[in-house]
Amino acid sequence: MNITVEDVAPCKKRLKIEVPANRVKQAYDKVADDFQKEARIPGFRPGHAPRAVVLKKFHKDIEGEAQRTLVPEAYQEAISEKLRKLLDDASRRERKIPFRGRLLDLFGVQVIHCNSFIAGDSVPLRSIQIPMIPTEQELPAFDARQRITDEFQAKLLSFRRTSLGVARKMQFDASKFTPALRDRARSLAAATPDDSELQAEVFDLLREEDAEIRADKLIDPSAIAGEAVLVACHGSPGGIAYVADLATIAEEMLRRRGEQPTIEPAVFGKQLKLLGFATERDAKGKKLHLTEAVRDRAQELVRDFGGSEVSDDPSQAGEGS
């Protein structure tokens, strides 16, 4: 049996199964034998009609039954453990699937198309079987967007006009979210400007995504650069810091956050320059003057890129918050 699994998307696979001709013939012959034993054909005693007559009369029925027997058997043999686990994880609300360094929540509907009926326990997990009967009639058109426009657009416009004044006066603190989510949080809260309980649920709704963004930001190169400069400012306010030392601080921060980086001082120096820090060169190498302006710029970077708060105690630097 020839089996191929194609990756269509992170949560979508295409499974192709080619069943050998001899196995198809065996299944067909077995079903034909059963039909012959039970066939009632005029002119012959029940179960004694010639095989050729039975095949001629019930060919399509025998072929269909053979397919219904073969498909679940082939499916059970073909589906890989990885694909079975994917289907199982996608059927459980608490399961998440690792993909490119992140955890994906694939809980939802899976659709498995088959030309024949999948019988009994061969259907994976919980399922609803929907027979697709061929027909020459044209399927009715269904435009969901038009229906939504016709039924809800006027109501939505009226609600927005009524609630606009209240929404403008709404007091909703989105500062607890990362900058990337603050506008969305405010927009969601504005949908119910006079219901503080529903607004509070915005935090629960976006909590998981906010945590994922924060985790990514903790290793963002720009945020790390800003944090490294702040650590140096805490350790030597008004002094100087060499780029090589700043690169070492950045490496230590990333190491404490589970990364294993190697930061070249030359590359780190170019990054500092791109972020607006002016360095100078002396006999020991490139250095950065730790002025108030430099400190303010570093704090701005940490705030804008969502980095971790830097303690006044440099020994605590680098721990994720």
Image (cartoon, grey):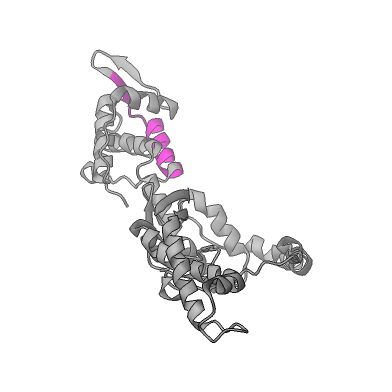
Instruction: State the residue in front, 199 or 48.
Output: 48
x%, y% of residue 319? Answer: 27, 48
Q: Is residue 57 above or below residue 21?
A: below
Q: Residue at x 38, y 40 (%)?
A: 220
180, 137: nearer the viewer: 137
Q: Which residue is pictured at 50% across the width and 78% down the height? A: 36
- Residue 79 visible within the image: no
x and y percent of residue 180 in the render? 50, 49
Residue 107 location in percent, x, y? 46, 64
**Magenta stretch: residue 291 in it?**
yes
Q: For the view shown, which residue lies furthest in the bottom direction?
A: 45
Query: Which corner quadrant holds the N terminus?
Result: bottom left
Q: Residue at x 56, y 74 (%)?
A: 54
Tally of numbered tags: 0
Magenta range: 286-304
Instruction: Where is residue 80? Give x, y as percent.
Output: 36, 57
Q: Which quadrant of the figure has residue 154?
A: bottom right
Taking the view exactly as shown, the residue that stands out farthest to the left is: 315
Q: Quadrant of residue 40?
A: bottom right
Q: Is residue 277 magenta?
A: no
Figure check: 213 above or below 91: above
Evaluate whether residue 216 shows in this view: yes
Q: Nearer the viewer, residue 109 or 287?
A: 109
Q: Taken as a whole, is the magenta stretch helix, strand or loop? A: helix
Q: In this view, does 51 lie to the left or right of 262?
A: right
Looking at this rendering, what residue extends furthest in the top direction?
283
